[in-house]
Amino acid sequence: MKTIGIMTSGGDAPGMNAAIRAVTRRAMFYGFKVCGINYGYAGLVAGDIFEMGRSDVGDIINRGGTMLYSARYPEFAQVSGQLRGIEQLKKFGVDALVVIGGDGSYHGALRLTEHGYNAIGLPGTIDNDIPYTDFTIGFDTAVNTVVELIDKIRDTAASHERTFVIEVMGRGAGDIALWAGTAGGADEIIVPEHEYNVQQIAQNIQNLRARGKKHTIVVLAEGVMHADEFMQQLKQYGDFDARSTVLGHVQRGGAPTARDRVLASKMGAYAVDLLKEGRGGIAVGMEQNKLTYHKISDLFTEKHQPDLELYDINKTLAK
Amino acid sequence: MKTIGIMTSGGDAPGMNAAIRAVTRRAMFYGFKVCGINYGYAGLVAGDIFEMGRSDVGDIINRGGTMLYSARYPEFAQVSGQLRGIEQLKKFGVDALVVIGGDGSYHGALRLTEHGYNAIGLPGTIDNDIPYTDFTIGFDTAVNTVVELIDKIRDTAASHERTFVIEVMGRGAGDIALWAGTAGGADEIIVPEHEYNVQQIAQNIQNLRARGKKHTIVVLAEGVMHADEFMQQLKQYGDFDARSTVLGHVQRGGAPTARDRVLASKMGAYAVDLLKEGRGGIAVGMEQNKLTYHKISDLFTEKHQPDLELYDINKTLAK
Amino acid sequence: MKTIGIMTSGGDAPGMNAAIRAVTRRAMFYGFKVCGINYGYAGLVAGDIFEMGRSDVGDIINRGGTMLYSARYPEFAQVSGQLRGIEQLKKFGVDALVVIGGDGSYHGALRLTEHGYNAIGLPGTIDNDIPYTDFTIGFDTAVNTVVELIDKIRDTAASHERTFVIEVMGRGAGDIALWAGTAGGADEIIVPEHEYNVQQIAQNIQNLRARGKKHTIVVLAEGVMHADEFMQQLKQYGDFDARSTVLGHVQRGGAPTARDRVLASKMGAYAVDLLKEGRGGIAVGMEQNKLTYHKISDLFTEKHQPDLELYDINKTLAK
Amino acid sequence: MKTIGIMTSGGDAPGMNAAIRAVTRRAMFYGFKVCGINYGYAGLVAGDIFEMGRSDVGDIINRGGTMLYSARYPEFAQVSGQLRGIEQLKKFGVDALVVIGGDGSYHGALRLTEHGYNAIGLPGTIDNDIPYTDFTIGFDTAVNTVVELIDKIRDTAASHERTFVIEVMGRGAGDIALWAGTAGGADEIIVPEHEYNVQQIAQNIQNLRARGKKHTIVVLAEGVMHADEFMQQLKQYGDFDARSTVLGHVQRGGAPTARDRVLASKMGAYAVDLLKEGRGGIAVGMEQNKLTYHKISDLFTEKHQPDLELYDINKTLAK
């Protein structure tokens, strides 16, 4: 192997740049050349590929987003696109590939490997919804962003004795809601992975208010329902001043936290080491604080499980 | 005068606590007693009044929201409520009053003064929509919060080459949009005080994209239209990947900026000085970096004007 | 067991309040009473003990420092003080104790348990220098604070093409330096646990500058040497514009990160569960993402090891 | 005039990039060409000059430091250097110049104008020590950075009932200390522009502690004395637990606040307008919220005055 390619795919996540830097610098440390591929699989097929140097990844460890841009490109599911991508890589002399992204990224990486072209996936998504890794790159930053915003909302909620329903990202996974809800001192956390009873929640809020609590905060994962709809349901069962707010796209951005930068650095370096050993078709993870890897095909049969212990703990702390 | 009362009214704003601290400490410096009134005019009428000491306002200068809580209370427009409020104040020996808040607060303060009870208003609102003051308490914090969020969104907008329509607070006033838009490097700022042409904006965005700009950001004051509606209109005229996001209630919270804390400290101290001189029915302002005051009645006939020079400057910088 | 006592001891750390909240709320969830003890072991001996309710720990999850204050109190090494402390606890009906703090806290907790009084220690220190836990409460916040400050210094370092020696906390342990250095993109990390060669570092900095790097950043653990001394040594071997800065006490403060709040919440709840089971003389840890506990006596014979893998990875990424 | 040059000089300040962007974009809006000059007067003499386009200043409005680098270059006081600089500018076809920086920048700009070459100065320094402007670019950011750090230190000060002496930047000017001290709720502010009495301060601190205040904070401008020396003096007169900390270089960095970005945008645009009108040898200011300009020679005979009203107000609020 002489040259490693790197790209980001799917939704962007804070820490992707730190991972790009780590792959690039580690590869150059070993004497490899590095090529960046813009716009994920779309850019791969289009040949939007360029050689990267050390200084190209200077001063990006602290930047949100991805300097290699990203795009969704479902067309890569077709074999013709995959072969065209490999052609482009060969044209640029790229021998192996690191893809940072979510679910879609892994499918592409697996297909490339099946065609005899080694590709490794790194989990880059704020949603934390990838199996065989305790944490994904970007999750810690998103959670901290949400917690800071909950802290701000708590100011105004307390001043007006209001109930706030705060919708956070996480289409299929309640991880952001669970972590940010616990850290934000939420009174209720609603996630797709756990049942809930609106009437009971409304009753609980009224009890808390009756006991003198100045504000109540409900953190809702977007995968469950829209915040406004949930608030309307709540109000059917309880008579209190409630507002809903959707935190939205700000959750994807911002300078990555220390944790995400370290995670990205470790995973990026590790991916290069694994490619150097001739491996492909695998996904890197961080399990129990140890770097691991698994066959990508195994990821498709495994389901990510959020830390529901947090749900139970928070229940006892919010009371 | 022996005792000064203080309360907050209307929507909460960062820096209200710094103003409460300043009023309290300044009054005690002169040897006055200080009474806090909870929940604005509602608490005034209900007699939710308590004596405050130095330590009650310790460690609050950096807190968002208001330790005296706030509430809207339109009932105070009735004379009976006003008289009942004065009765309560007399019962607690409160001789004069400082009210921190927006438009509604001023009406109440004027009524009290007309009944022979001196009350002074401080401009506490994130919207900056109060005449005879260049800046209101809370505005600088809200603008900085919005700018930080725009910075985050720019990360993700650039990564995906997207157009973002970002709705910020300001029902009747475009100040937050103008300041945060300029500081956030927005490509377009839409405010109630300035006409706009959706077709032209869509064209401009397409031109910017054609020229290679990776992201375009439109900052929209809530008083104009809902972000989603605006985005739909935009898309009728242009073919680009656009998203809308409403920043929402987070704009009201957070630790106040240095500027808001200093403004609140100066205004709070000044209000006490003015009450000490026997004045009432006036509103404190900061005009051209100088503390000023005006008759509250003059505020009702004057309209706040945002700094539209910013609009013109930004037009030339965004191109 | 009917009543649980809680106190903080030694240097304060962000997340201590979140732990106090978790212990209090979890205990009340089980129907126990909770007593707070001010000023650590000093307050224990002096009987500065008071009953805590749910609202006493409201709105503290996001506050740095410790609402129970802290103090160093070496006198607690004497048996007389220990017995006096137990007397006080009995006087207030406190049956068991949770102590949050560092090394000194554990010694006290062990002594109390040896006298037949169950006490459990939680690792609360920014230094991360406690065995049998991967992370201590406060470490993640301190690392993030340092990284944000390194990001700021990088701005000015790049503008002036300077070398900065940044001294971070960690008397005996290099954890903060290792994590913050890696996350901050430091060119060199100097810790007590790894040898270094000043001449080689100076040479490396000159090489980086010769290659066009605009700034070089050295992160130095305080346990190694004072930043200014290190800079003087560096300058003996290299001719470049260098500055030193000591980040100082700001590293202890600030709102805790999401990670620290969740860690503190989990550990606090777990400590109550363990006391409920009748255990004492143990220390709670988080190892490989799992809650664990060990005999306090075992902690004294084990030495904490920082993650030196980070040292090696950073070497290859900084080049 | 066809081409405008732009450079930064002296110590860097947050907002310099926003000013560079504003000058560049405004000039291009009028159809001018723009040249950037790296490393201030040193780069000018060396001919380190390059044409800038719109995208060169994209995504820099939110960055601290200066993309054009800066350097101190006292050699520019010599006529030979000045003439060499003008030669370089002519070689690159640059007709007029904007210099962003402090005192030294103005001297150079005046010299160039005296040689018949129009140059305009913008006040870019965190110290706020420039006459004929109420605020300099970078000051608001530095003050907010200091206030955030004071907030962090207050956490730990309160937890341990300590007195902290916090040294902030400002060699000749107490502006940062005055603003950050007032906004940070400091008990004492020590600046070069106001006398102080150490014994009285020590007595005041002891009084505050006797009254139950948990922490006392002294904010000290670096121009007065080193923090450690001040603390030693304090301790001669009072018996209390005190620590000193020097905030240092972090005060220069970080993303600029909204206020600094707006100030820089307005001043940058205005400087281009003034050059377009054929003016030179002048300095731009913001006085009483209005853009102004003065002859540079007038700045040298005028002394900047900090807002000592803040000193007096804080005295009454800290008590």
Image (spheres, coloured by chain):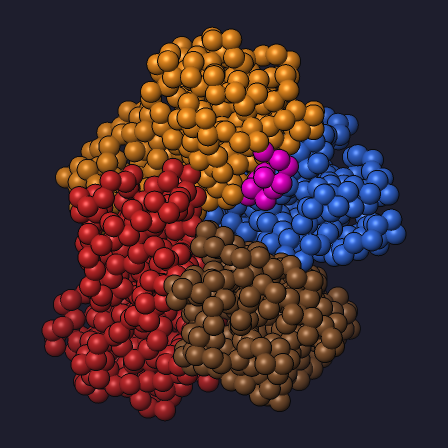
Chain colours: A orange, B red, C blue, D brown
Above-or-below relation of A218 to B100: above
Q: Is residue A61 magenta?
A: yes
Q: Is residue B45 magenta?
A: no
Q: Nearer the viewer, residue D183 or C295?
A: D183
Horizontal and vertical percent position of residue C54: 41, 45
The structure residue drawn at horizontal position 29% and vertical position 39%, both measured from the top left corner, is B241
Task: Determine which quarter of the picture holds residue B109.
Answer: bottom left
Above-or-below relation of D317 to D244: below
Horizontal and vertical percent position of residue D191: 64, 77
Q: Nearer the viewer, residue B209 or C5?
A: B209
Horizontal and vertical percent position of residue C25: 44, 39
The structure residue drawn at horizontal position 37% and vertical position 13%, both measured from the top left corner, is A80
Above-or-below relation of D19 to A283: below
Horizontal and vertical percent position of residue B1: 35, 87
Quadrant of the drawing holding the N terminus of chain A: top right
Above-or-below relation of C176 to D256: above
- Side (left or right) of C250 relative to B30: right
Which region is colored magenta?
A: A52-62
Figure disc tally: 0
The structure residue drawn at horizontal position 27% and vertical position 44%, both measured from the top left corner, is B244
Whether residue C44 is visible to the viewer of this picture, yes or no, is no
The structure residue drawn at horizontal position 31% and vertical position 66%, both measured from the top left corner, is B311
Task: Determine which quarter of the picture holds residue D146.
Answer: bottom right
- Side (left or right) of C89 relative to B32: right
Whether residue C298 is visible to the viewer of this picture, yes or no, is yes
Quadrant of the drawing holding the C terminus of chain A: top left
Task: Determine which quarter of the picture holds residue A313.
Answer: top left
Q: Nearer the viewer, residue B246 or A135?
A: B246
- Side (left or right) of A269 relative to B108: right
Q: Nearer the viewer, residue C1 or A315?
A: A315
